[in-house]
Amino acid sequence: MKVLFKEIQIQTNERTEIIDITGKVEDIINRSEITNGLCVIHTVHSTAAIIINEHEKGLKKDIVRKIREDFPKDAGWLHNEVDDNADAHLASTYIGPTKIFPIQRGKIIRGPWQNIFLLELDGPRTRRVMVEIIGE
Ligand code: ZN
């Protein structure tokens, strides 16, 4: 079994933003010598997440709108007394920081409309996404 670990750094520009990292993840897989296994994509932040979906301009705006509707900035959150970003922590908690894909014959197994995105929930910041490939 082989393991390859890489870190991607991403500078975000908005408070809530969806950034396509599919190309960066696939570059890492293509350069690895692992042809069959798993790829773990994990962001090490409590106010960001990893999501999988279609890269379409309107849909990206719909996702941001839905997050704002489901996790309003000011709703009497107790954490806002400390840090003023409870909405970002809540969204990250429910959406999740990690996704896993199978790798077969050197390629990530994903549908044609399944791109990989870093979801920024409390930007702008510099974000770290860890990519670990485990296999043979
Ligand atoms: Zn906080």
Image: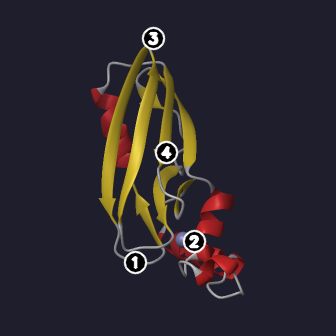
SS under mark 2: helix
Name the spot of residue 12 as percent of width and height, x first. 35, 68
SS under mark 3: loop
SS under mark 1: loop
Q: Earlier in the sequence, mark 2 or mark 3?
A: 3
Q: Name the residue at 32% across, 35% down.
A: 28
Q: Earlier in the sequence, mark 4 or mark 3?
A: 3
Pick the residue in front: 25 or 4.
Answer: 4
Please name the residue that numbered disc 4 is placed on.
42
Mark 2 close to ligand 1, CB under 8 Å: yes
Name the spot of residue 13 as percent of width and height, x first. 34, 74
Tell me whether the residue at label 4 lies in contact with that at label 3, contact meaning CB atoms closer than 8 angstroms.
no
Q: Amino acid at mark 2?
A: Ala
Query: Residue 88: which numbered mark, if any?
Result: 2
Tell me the crowding category of disc 3: few under 14, some 14 to 19, or many 20 or more residues within 10 angstroms, Cα based. Answer: few
Please name the residue that numbered disc 1 is placed on.
14
Q: Is residue 89 left or right of residue 26?
A: right
